[in-house]
Amino acid sequence: MLLLALGLRLGWGLSRPSAIDERLPDQREYLQLAENLLRHGQLVMDHDRFGPVRAYRMPGYPLFLALCGASVTAARMAQAVIDASVVLAVYLVARRWLSAPTALLASLATALNPFQIYFAALILSETLFTAMLAWGTALLAWRPGFLWGGIVLALAVHVRPSAVFLPLAMGYCAVFATHSAEMRRRRGWLRLPVGAGMLLLTAAALTPWWLRNLNVLESWVWLTTNGGITRYDGFNPDATGASDQSFLDTAVAAPAYSLNELARDRYFADLASSYIRETWQDDPARLLKLTLAKLARTWSPMPLSAEFGGRALYRWIALSWCVPLFALALVGLCRRELPRPARALLVAPALYFTVIHAMSVGSLRYRVPAEPLLSVLAAAGATAILPAIAEGLRRVAGRRVSVKASGNDQSPQRPADAGNGGEQGEAQRNAAGERP
């Protein structure tokens, strides 16, 4: 299974052009940050509108690219290996509560996931974050307490800032999902309350970043200076639920060009807050429609962007994958093959990112990290319904055999076995003048 996953990801990645896809400009920003780290030792990039910015992106993924030499090909190969490892992590998570065949089914689904294969060839943070989430969950499921899984999930915030409260949510779910006398005996020395423990781990993981920002920007920056723009991207008069930062070229953004990085972030955050407040008072239905549009984009079974949704091949691959996965995951969520706390742990990332991106912008790329854990639910759902499907097929086959047997019983009988008897039939033929 691991070799299958690795072969698919390496094959796809090495078949792509060496240049990055300009339709996804985030790739260029990450590469520029990695190059500046290697050449100058500074996490800085030149924004195409605002000039140099120093805390616009979290440092985790640029550091990973720097370790790959800021090489697109090397990063793709490394991401193929990292994403293939998710197959093993999913098996371990599933094996915590399910049988080995069901866990293998979940691993197979992860190995064949077309979105994971596709994103493994992009210079975006999805692949690295997906692996950290999957392995963090595996550690929470198997290790006593929450220390090791909490560390991995806390470090994942350096890759995706929107996951800042995810360690807390996963920690709470894991406490109930792994609650047993055996796990209590194996907890070891760490006996902090899970909420306080996860918050402390997250704060400890982010402290170097906070101190760096205080030194470079002379101000506390908890995550990034990109949050204000992202928020206004999701809440502005022309917002559709998708990311469209063309407002940066309009009059509303003109004052931001004379502001520094921190003031610019606050400026756009204040604009978004004002829009939410005014719309809530004047047209709350508009906010509801906008939120529903973001949810629909995040969980769309096929790409909706003009660049990717316009290709029939992409649409059919996505639909043929997502519809069965989501349907079986819902079955697994409703059935009892998994304990209820385990189901909560597996669905927690999907619910978390649904809420988070309802407050910014929606895109299917934001749900990709949650899909490996949904594959565990889908495997449990398939295990639940396959026996019922097999029983239904046996009943249909049994009815067909019964109908066929009934038809054979009603076939014409031989003359000797006829109702009138052989001798009586012969007498009737003689009376009619026929020779025996």
Image: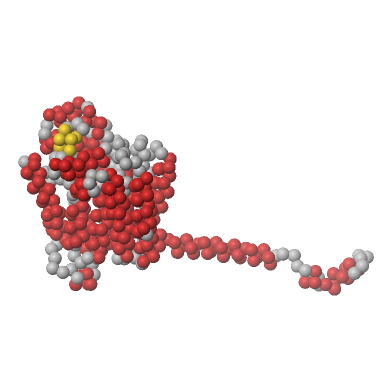
User: Which residue lies at the image location 35% right of the left edge and 51% below the top edge?
Assistant: 10
Q: Nearer the viewer, residue 338 or 249?
A: 249
Residue 242 in view: no
Q: Position of residue 256 (x, y in %)?
A: 15, 31
User: Which residue lies at the image location 25% right of the left edge and 51% below the top edge?
Assistant: 129
Q: Is residue 327 left or right of residue 416?
A: left
Work out which quarter of the rendered image holds the N terminus and state it.
bottom left
User: Which residue lies at the image location 16% right of the left edge and 33% below the top edge?
Assistant: 51
Work out which quarter of the rendered image holds the C terminus and state it.
bottom right
Q: Nearer the viewer, residue 283 or 240?
A: 240
Q: Position of residue 115 (x, y in %)?
A: 35, 48
Q: Position of residue 225 (x, y in %)?
A: 15, 40
The answer to whether residue 249 is above or below residue 214 is: above
Q: Position of residue 336 (x, y in %)?
A: 35, 63
User: Which residue lies at the image location 80% right of the left edge and 69% below the top edge?
Assistant: 415
Q: Nearer the viewer, residue 231 or 81?
A: 81
Q: Quadrant of residue 263?
A: top left
